[in-house]
């Protein structure tokens, strides 16, 4: 399983998507804009066990905010949305206000539609993201992708019902490994975030769930197999919440 992957952006995306369909029970292909969603859906078509969802990546909001109305329309036709969220890093400081507006609109629309599962980018912005989620009870389910917040923010997110999708790249730093040790294991699902996320200088592949289990095992004080069973069970629970059928 892979709950956050830019499958369309790998070199040879069609071949990679076909391999993911063979090797994974489920792959969530998050897109970066409404136009990218339409293009990817057209190019890849229906791929078994691959979910393609519309999104509006916070790093692109400054140039793509005009696509927001299109995204809100697309949301009526899908059960899940991503990638969306807020990026609080200095590089995107100038668009922070617009990012807030876009994310607020997405979460509000999710509630209006009866709930959606959202794959959420929250780098340096957990304090911005959580209040917006709280503002719209009934918005659905939040999956915080590659969570990098504080322990206090993690605890707050967990109490709100949030999930956490994590992959091998999260273990590349000491801070990431320390956080991984604290994550609530009943709400963690695997992700690759490929091809952007890398491990040892190479893009993480969509079928990296086994590697993720291997990395979590020592922090969860269990065997690699037990970690894999946990990730698999969590994934199935989240898929049920998504109403997923391949």
Image (tube, rainbow, N blue to C red):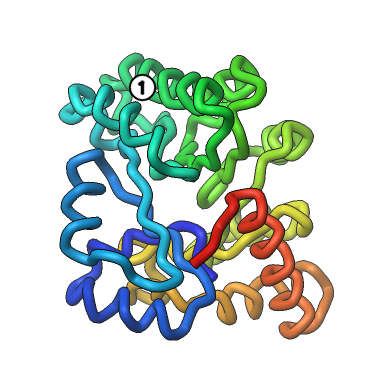
- Dividing the picture into quadrants, the one containing residue 47 is bottom left
**Residue 165 location in percent, x, y?**
57, 55
Who is closer to the viewer here, 121 or 89? 121
- Vertical side of 96 occupied by 207: above or below: below
Question: How many marks on residues?
Answer: 1
- Vertical side of 228 occupied by 173: above or below: above
Judge left or right: residue 121 versus residue 38. right
The N terminus - image quarter: bottom right
**Residue 93 location in percent, x, y?**
32, 23
Name the secondary structure under disc 1: helix
- Dividing the picture into quadrants, the one containing residue 238 is bottom right
Who is closer to the viewer here, 143 or 49? 49
- Vertical side of 37 occupied by 222: above or below: below
**Residue 39 location in percent, x, y?**
16, 52
- Vertical side of 37 occupied by 199: above or below: below
Judge left or right: residue 20 versus residue 231. left
Give the residue drawn at x 31%, y 17%.
98
Is residue 168 something one can see in this rendering? no
Give the residue drawn at x 24%, y 56%.
41
Give the residue drawn at x 57%, y 32%.
115
**Residue 218 location in percent, x, y?**
75, 75
Is residue 207 something one can see in this rendering? yes
User: Callout 1: 10 Å neighbours few (<14), some, many (20+)?
Assistant: many
Q: Which residue is mark 1?
A: 102
- Dividing the picture into quadrants, the one containing residue 16 is bottom left
């Amino acid at each position: 399983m892979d709950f956050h992957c830019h499958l369309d952006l790998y070199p040879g995306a069609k071949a990679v998507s076909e391999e993911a369909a063979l090797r994974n029970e489920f792959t969530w292909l998050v897109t970066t804009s409404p136009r990218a969603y339409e293009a990817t859906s057209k190019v890849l078509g229906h791929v078994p066990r691959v979910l393609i969802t519309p999104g509006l990546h916070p790093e692109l909001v400054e140039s793509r905010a005009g696509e927001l109305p299109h995204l809100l329309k697309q949301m009526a036709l899908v059960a899940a949305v991503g990638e969306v969220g807020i990026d609080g890093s200095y590089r995107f400081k100038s668009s922070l206000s617009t990012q807030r507006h876009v994310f607020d609109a997405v979460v509000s629309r999710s509630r209006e539609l009866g709930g959606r599962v959202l794959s959420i980018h929250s780098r340096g912005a957990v304090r911005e993201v959580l209040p917006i989620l709280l503002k719209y009870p009934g918005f659905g389910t939040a999956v915080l992708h590659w969570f990098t917040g504080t322990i206090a923010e993690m605890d707050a997110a967990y109490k709100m019902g949030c999930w956490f999708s994590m992959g091998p790249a999260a273990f590349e730093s000491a801070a990431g490994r320390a956080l991984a040790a604290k994550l609530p294991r009943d709400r963690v699902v695997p992700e690759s975030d490929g091809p952007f996320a890398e491990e040892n200088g190479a893009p993480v592949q969509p079928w990296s769930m086994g590697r993720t289990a291997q990395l979590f095992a020592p922090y969860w004080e269990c065997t690699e197999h037990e970690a894999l069973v946990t990730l698999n069970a969590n994934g199935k629970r989240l898929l049920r919440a998504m109403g997923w059928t391949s």
